[in-house]
DNA sequence: GTAGGGTTAG
């Protein structure tokens, strides 16, 4: 006997397959259901739109929208929210705004979820004022903000350098009855750590521990990362074991954090062990996991394995990102293969990444250290964008070569552009000028350093 | 259907 499948049951099946990324099986369920006389509804299509946006690409999601239209089913706010989220996650911001216009033109009013995503987009575009305007003019008057609205706000403020504002907002909301979630605490702890306010971060962590919430893997990973970044390696490892003792499961994030720290401190065997455990546990390696592994093999000079990994990344359907290429360039430089690194840097230029500043910085520093300081200076001259790391590294290396006059010139350009050079490096230049008898040059530099300091404060 | 943690350079 053939039974008609209820729409609800079909949707549950479709959702289950979508959740585990088995889109073909989800589509097969729909085909079978149609054959048995059950037609997909807006929920079915929305499930597919979300899954295709998430696991395939935005166009795949959009093609489901066309299928909906052909089936005479009207998209709703959920359909558009999924598409907007898909565009936002891929940083296709103009597509987000287009989709927003499209839904409004179709008479589908955006809801608080739509505006939350819009706020998130503005924050990612480094336009915090626009994000605040969305909250003030769109969400507050007509809709009520939800916990995600505030979490998006906290996160956006922190990521845009307004950690104090985020903390202030948190305090005032809390006084007015706002109940923070675990994610709220995690956002603030990370933001405070990132801006160097470790004491404030610890206070928020204490608040979290005193609330009825339990820290999770994300909280631990954040704390661990900042231990490593602050050079407190053993402390970070302690956090890792504390996490284990408390029965938390490690995910790709925590393994990546700790294995990268192992690799940096030369404990490569333990770093590799993390990967064995990850694979044993069935954790799928994403591009970040691969990047750390590439770095490990580079450090060890295991080039055949590096190139095998690059193939493996493609075979897994992943794409090498700016970190992969930069890691490779740095590794090649460190191994003394300057030509190979330069070739790869040029190749990276052709790939159209938003930024390859770090790769250039690696090149400049490693070229200097390998004794090719003039080659490094030539690359430095071709750079359109430089940051304080570019300058610090070049100035430092020029001093090592006792080329204090050139170091002073580079440092002056840097200060003129309002950028900082690591303070001990500045002192080495002044001292070097003195020891070389270039007294007036030293005085000039010192007064410029002082001036820059005043202008910054 | 929206929000958080992991990877590169001085």
Image (tube, coloured by chain):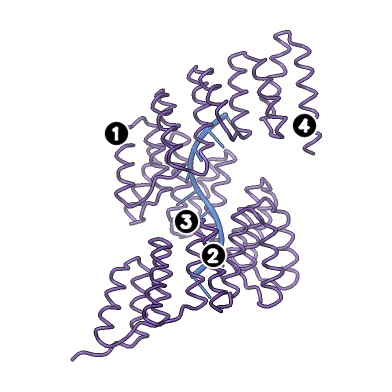
Chain colours: A purple, B blue
Q: Which residue is mark 3?
A: A245
**Upstream in sequence: badge 4 or badge 1:** 1
Between label 4 and label 1, give the one nearer the viewer: 4
**Upstream in sequence: badge 4 or badge 2:** 2
Both labels 4 and 2 in a single chain: yes
Alpha carbon separation for disc pair 3 and 1: 38 Å
**Upstream in sequence: badge 2 or badge 1:** 2
- Foreground of the two, A23 or A259: A23
Please name the residue shown 66% across and 15% down the image: A404
Between label 3 and label 1, give the one nearer the viewer: 1
Alpha carbon separation for disc pair 4 and 1: 48 Å
Circles 3 and 1, Cβ within 8 Å, touching? The answer is no
Label count reads: 4
Both labels 3 and 4 in a single chain: yes
Q: Which residue is mark 1?
A: A304
Q: Quadrant of the C terminus of chain A?
A: top right
Alpha carbon separation for disc pair 2 and 1: 46 Å
Circles 4 and 1, Cβ within 8 Å, touching? The answer is no
Between label 4 and label 2, give the one nearer the viewer: 2
Q: Quadrant of residue A14?
A: bottom left
In the rendered structure, find residue A452 and report the number of the disc placed on it: 4
Alpha carbon separation for disc pair 3 and 2: 49 Å
Circles 2 and 1, Cβ within 8 Å, touching? The answer is no
Please name the residue shown 52% across and 41% down the image: A355
The answer for which chain carries disc 1 is A
Query: Alpha-carbon neighbours of circle 1 within 10 Å: few (<14), some, or many (≥20)?
Result: few
In the rendered structure, find residue A98 and report the number of the disc placed on it: 2
Q: Please tell me whether mark 4 sits on a helix, a strand or a loop.
A: helix
């Amino acid at each position: 006997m053939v039974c008609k499948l209820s729409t609800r049951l079909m949707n549950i099946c479709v959702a289950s397959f979508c959740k585990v990324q088995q889109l073909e099986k989800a589509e097969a369920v729909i085909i079978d259901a149609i054959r048995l006389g059950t037609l997909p509804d807006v929920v079915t299509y929305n499930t597919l739109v979300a899954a295709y946006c998430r696991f395939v690409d935005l166009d795949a999601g959009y093609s489901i929208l066309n299928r909906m239209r052909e089936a005479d089913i009207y998209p709703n706010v959920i359909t558009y929210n999924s598409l907007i989220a898909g565009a936002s996650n891929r940083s296709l911001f103009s597509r987000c705004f287009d989709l927003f216009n499209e839904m409004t033109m179709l008479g589908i009013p955006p809801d608080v979820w739509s505006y939350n995503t819009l706020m998130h987009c503005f924050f990612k575009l480094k336009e915090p004022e626009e994000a605040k305007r969305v909250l003030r003019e769109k969400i507050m008057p007509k809709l009520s903000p939800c916990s995600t609205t505030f979490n998006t706000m906290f996160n956006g403020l922190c990521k845009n350098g307004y950690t104090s504002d985020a903390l202030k907002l948190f305090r005032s909301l809390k006084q007015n009855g706002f109940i923070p979630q675990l994610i709220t605490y995690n956002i603030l702890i990370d933001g405070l750590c990132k801006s160097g306010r470790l004491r404030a971060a610890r206070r928020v962590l204490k608040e979290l521990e005193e609330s009825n919430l339990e820290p999770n893997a994300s909280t631990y990973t954040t704390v661990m990362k900042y231990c490593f970044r602050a050079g407190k390696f053993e402390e970070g490892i302690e956090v890792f074991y504390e996490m284990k003792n408390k029965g938390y499961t490690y995910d790709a994030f925590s393994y990546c954090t700790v294995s990268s720290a192992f690799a940096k401190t030369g404990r490569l065997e333990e770093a590799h062990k993390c990967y064995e455990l990850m694979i044993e546990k069935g954790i799928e390696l994403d591009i970040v996991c691969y990047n750390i592994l590439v770095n490990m093999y580079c450090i060890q000079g295991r080039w055949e394995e590096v190139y095998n990994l690059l193939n493996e990344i493609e075979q897994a359907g992943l794409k090498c990102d700016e970190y992969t290429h930069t890691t490779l360039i740095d590794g090649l430089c460190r191994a003394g293969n300057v030509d190979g690194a330069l070739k790869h840097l040029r190749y990276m230029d052709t790939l159209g990444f938003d930024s390859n500043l770090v790769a250039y910085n690696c090149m400049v520093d490693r070229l200097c250290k390998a004794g090719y300081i003039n080659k490094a200076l030539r690359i430095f001259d071709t750079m359109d964008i430089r940051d304080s790391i570019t300058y610090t590294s070049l100035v430092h290396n020029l001093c090592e070569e006792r080329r204090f006059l050139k170091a002073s010139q580079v440092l002056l350009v840097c200060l003129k552009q309002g950028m900082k050079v690591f303070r001990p490096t500045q002192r080495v230049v002044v001292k070097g000028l003195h020891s070389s008898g270039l007294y007036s040059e030293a005085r000039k530099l010192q007064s410029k350093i002082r001036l820059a300091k005043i202008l910054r404060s």
